[in-house]
Amino acid sequence: MSSQPVWIVGAGPGAPDLLTLRAARAIEQAEVLVWTDSLVNPQISALAPTTCERIRTSTLTLEEVIAAVVERARSGKRVVRLHDGDPCLYGALAEQICRLADAEIPVEVVPGISAYQATAASLGSELTIPGLVQTIVLSRAGGRTGVPESESLARLAALRASLCLYLSARHVAEVQEELLRHYPADTPVAIGYRVSWPDQWLTVVPLSAMAQVSEQRGLVRTTLYVVSPALAPPQEARSKLYSASHNHLFRGGI
């Protein structure tokens, strides 16, 4: 029997209604659900059929996950590998695709909404304000696994872009210290814990209070920081795209 494609699906930040339609359909049709149970909302895994085999991955190594996926796919079952957020961000996507390619198993990847997008939406904020900031950087603190020197926090912070930091709550004091070398102390920082979950906690504080607030709240995981002057834009900020004086392909200017 030929192998079914394995579906690697982004579950989004947490809320079931933030799944893409393609993701929801893939889960609803799964015969085997291999899911990140420590990070994905159980309401999302519950969308799979009652007859679906569910394999939790919180205690498994990558090799154990791949072995389970390959075995089920080769038996002709429709396997959905369910990740939190978007699989292309800190999801070990490349490692899984390479190993599945070695096993000659095709892969379909379904993107998911990321926590930084859900955070901006919850705040009703745009992260790219004309004349203020036009770049969004997605990164993390070095921590135990490190980052390339060319992507050090110091280099990224020097851009003064909208900086979205994942996997950094355990190192928040060091992160704040470095950021204060580049951003003004009153730069707004959104701190989001389990954004879009029923127990979501989201606040905006000055950069100078980032570590204190995090530590008081006891945040060590499932926390995102968005450091950006765009969270407090000037009232006069305006895009040229919709300005009457700006002409483009579909509209003449004054």
Image (spheres, rainbow, N blue to C red):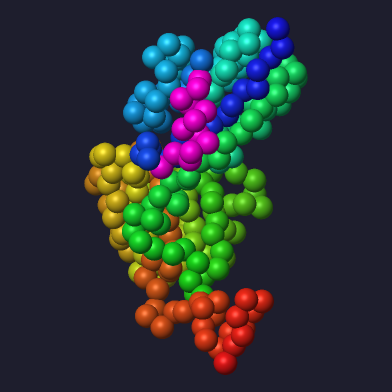
Nearest the eye: 244 or 71: 244
Q: Is residue 165 left or right of residue 14?
A: right
Does residue 161 belong to the magenta stretch?
no
Number of numbered discs on residues: 0
Against 115, residue 37 (above or below) is above
Name the residue located 43 percent from the left edge and 21 percent from the top edge.
Answer: 48
Nearest the eye: 97 or 43: 43
The image position of residue 185, as x and y in percent, is 38, 68
Against 122, residue 39 (above or below) is above
The image position of residue 78, as x and y in percent, is 57, 17
Of the 4 image quadrants, the one containing the N terminus is top right
Q: Is residue 39 left or right of residue 215?
A: right
Against 218, residue 47 (above or below) is above
The image position of residue 197, as x and y in percent, is 31, 39
Instruction: Locate residue 134: give its quadrant.
Output: bottom right
Name the residue located 43 percent from the left edge and 46 percent from the top edge.
Answer: 115
The magenta segment? 18-30
Of the 4 image quadrants, the one containing the C terminus is bottom right
Name the residue located 39 percent from the left edge and 78 percent from the top edge.
Answer: 234
- Res 130 seen here: yes
Instruction: Locate residue 135: give its quadrant.
Output: bottom right
The image position of residue 216, as x and y in percent, is 24, 46
Instruction: Locate residue 208: give its quadrant.
Output: bottom left
Name the residue located 41 percent from the left edge and 42 percent from the top edge.
Answer: 18
Does residue 23 belong to the magenta stretch?
yes
Nearest the eye: 227 or 89: 89
Q: Is residue 46 left or right of residue 128?
A: left
Dominant secondary structure of the residues highlighted in magenta in the image = helix
- Res 146 seen here: no
